[in-house]
Amino acid sequence: MNRLRILGLALVAVFAMSAVVASAASAAWVASPWEAFYSGSWHVVTTTIKVTSAGTLKLKNGGDEVECEGTNKGTIGAGGIDEVLTVTVKNPCKLIANSGCKSPQPSGFPKAAAIHLPWKTQLEDETNGEKRDKITAHTGGEAPGWSVECENILKGKSKVECTAAEELTKVTNESMSFLTTFAPTGEPASCKGGISSKGAVIGPVKFSVEAGQEIGGEKVEGVRAG
């Protein structure tokens, strides 16, 4: 009888562990809504709201790494869909590590730019509460990415372009804004023209509502991931 009881408890433990594993395996990212603060409370976004952002990002390709400040303009909309419409980089960027690029750089270099704009993004939510913004190509467009141009060690100009069919950023809310953070995880970007075929973007970008936005005659004071 004791052996049967022990066997029964073991089977229960196995089934319980199997259920946990199955639950973890079935966890999936699903579309999540944006929210806007107006009329004294937060509301699910059902219309298009203009947003702006600012941040400092590191762009890496092999042993070359630059740090760039920039801003962008875009929108958030219903169903967690949003767009990055323009990106303005404050060139020249700062060369913080070099291999193919010479140091120091001449005036105006290195310089960076976003390529294949506009980009489409989708806010998603995971069962554990984490949120991410998935950046992909716009309908009919090419994969989103970035380029960096520098003077190389042979004193000629080199330009690397890096793209990713899907770029994932972690989303965290602040009081009236949100951060999207690029991290060197997952699949690296594919690069051409540089010293390596792989690249990465690292760093946070802060998004805020663009001034003058209204919904139903009420001023929009903040935006966040729902």
Image (cartoon, rainbow, N blue to C red):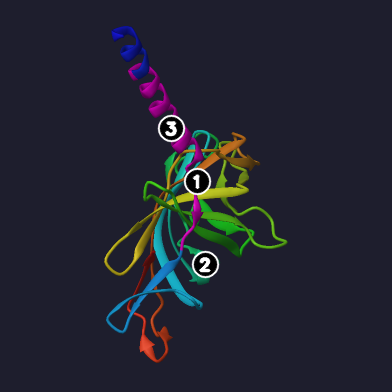
Q: Give the residue at x 69% y 63%.
A: 139
Q: For residue 2, which quarter of the picture?
A: top left
- Which residue position is annotated with label 2? 79
Please say whether residue 170 is visible from this viewpoint: yes
Q: Give the residue at x 35% y 11%.
A: 4
The x and y percentages for residue 75 are 50, 72
- Which residue position is annotated with label 3? 19
In three-dimensional space, the C-alpha distance between marks 2 and 1, rounded to whole angstroms, equals: 17 Å
Q: Which residues are magenta?
A: 9-32
Dot 1 crowding, Cα within 10 Å, few <14, some 14–19, many 20+: few
Task: Work out which quarter of the rendered image holds the C terminus and state it.
Answer: bottom left
- Upstream in sequence: badge 1 or badge 3: 3
Is residue 81 or residue 212 the one in the foreground?
81
Task: Work out which quarter of the rendered image holds the N terminus and state it.
Answer: top left
Q: Amino acid at mark 2?
A: Gly
Q: Give the residue at x 58% y 49%.
A: 166
Residue sitting at the far front: 1
The x and y percentages for residue 218 are 36, 88
- Determine the secondary structure under disc 3: helix
Q: Is residue 108 magenta?
A: no
Q: Amino acid at mark 1?
A: Ala
- Which residue position is annotated with label 1? 28
- Upstream in sequence: badge 2 or badge 1: 1
Q: Give the residue at x 36% y 23%.
A: 13
In three-dimensional space, the C-alpha distance between marks 1 and 3, rounded to whole angstroms, equals: 16 Å
Q: Nearer the viewer, mark 3 or mark 2?
A: 3
Dot 2 crowding, Cα within 10 Å, few <14, some 14–19, many 20+: some
Please say whether residue 109 is visible from this viewpoint: no
Is residue 133 or residue 69 the one in the foreground?
133
